[in-house]
């Protein structure tokens, strides 16, 4: 059974810091891994999608890496801003069957001005 | 191209009533997934549908919950005889193919009183 774990559960940093969010998963049989952002009371916004054959993806100040063999992904946020405050969710899409997403519980990020 | 549209955004039901949640996928997307987010929990898969077919309902409670995705119109998640434990945020996601990038709606927040 695929399990996704995100560490830390919460993180508070001063504005301008670079930071890393971690995601680990137990089964490497995945199509892809997706990072999302969720603001309080809102839906999920897709940030980055990494296919299983890829090592990393970049979008602006965000960089996500994937090491499928070790079951790990990181989301790197450069020069953090207060507007980055949100919960960040990691999800893997399973191979076979319904190809559903399995989510971690998220990391709640607070960037203090 | 409008995103995934869910309505209503907020729904209040008394115990024993029925709740109907609607999801219109993005244009051109024929794969719809429903997920539930309980307070302080991660998102959990409920059901995967394609037009007129339920592909995987392994995450659905055995009783009171049903889902459909008719040939015409939105996907519907129906909860009969709601109980307080059904209070949660229900998210719909769509994709053009099952294992490609998932796009989420804003969710429906169900409160059972």
Image: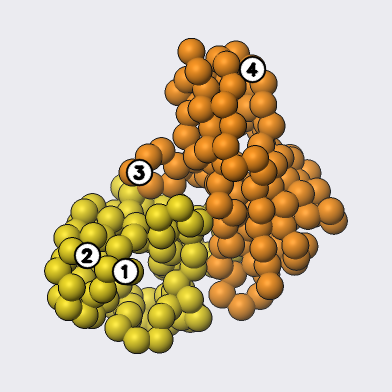
Chain colours: A orange, B yellow
**Left or right: A109, with B107 as reference point:** right
> Which residue is painted at 52% across and 22% down in the image?
A111
Give the residue pinned by disc 1.
B86
Between disc 4 and disc 1, the foreground one is 1
Mark 3, residue position: A42
Label 1 environment density (alpha carbons within 10 Å; few <14, some 14–19, many ≥20): some
Q: Determine which quarter of the picture holds residue B15.
A: bottom left
Q: Quadrant of residue A28?
A: bottom right
Identify the residue at image location x=57%, y=26%.
A12
Q: Which disc number belongs to residue B112?
A: 2
In this image, A41 relative to B11: left or right?
right
* Chain ID, mark 4: A
Q: Nearer the viewer, residue B88 or B4?
A: B88
B17 sits to left or right of A96? left
Q: Secondary structure at mark 2?
A: strand
Q: Position of residue A82 (x, y in %)?
A: 47, 20
**Do tag 3 and tag 1 residues touch (Cβ < 8 Å)?**
no
Q: Mark 4 or 3 closer to N-term? A: 4
Q: Is residue B34 above or below residue A21?
A: below
Look at the numbered disc 4 and give the secondary structure of its residue.
loop
């Amino acid at each position: 059974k695929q399990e996704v774990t995100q560490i830390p559960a919460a993180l508070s940093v001063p504005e301008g810091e670079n930071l890393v969010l971690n995601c680990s998963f137990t089964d490497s049989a995945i199509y892809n891994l997706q990072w999302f952002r969720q603001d309080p009371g809102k839906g999920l916004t897709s940030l980055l999608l990494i296919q299983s054959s890829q090592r990393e993806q970049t979008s602006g100040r965000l960089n996500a890496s994937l090491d499928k063999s070790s079951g790990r992904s990181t989301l790197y946020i450069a020069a953090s801003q207060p507007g980055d405050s949100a919960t960040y969710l990691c999800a893997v899409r399973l191979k076979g069957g319904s190809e559903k997403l399995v989510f971690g519980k998220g990391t709640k990020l607070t960037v203090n001005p | 191209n409008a995103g995934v549209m869910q309505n209503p955004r907020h729904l209040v039901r008394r115990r024993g009533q029925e709740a109907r949640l609607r999801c219109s996928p993005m244009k051109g997307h024929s794969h719809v997934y429903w997920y539930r987010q309980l307070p302080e929990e991660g998102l959990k898969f409920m059901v995967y549908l394609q037009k007129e077919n339920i592909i995987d309902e392994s995450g659905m409670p055995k009783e009171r919950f049903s889902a459909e995705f008719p040939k015409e119109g939105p996907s519907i998640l129906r909860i009969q005889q709601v109980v307080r434990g059904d209070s949660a945020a229900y998210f719909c996601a769509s994709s053009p193919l099952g294992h490609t990038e998932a796009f989420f709606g804003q969710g429906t927040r169900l409160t059972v009183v």
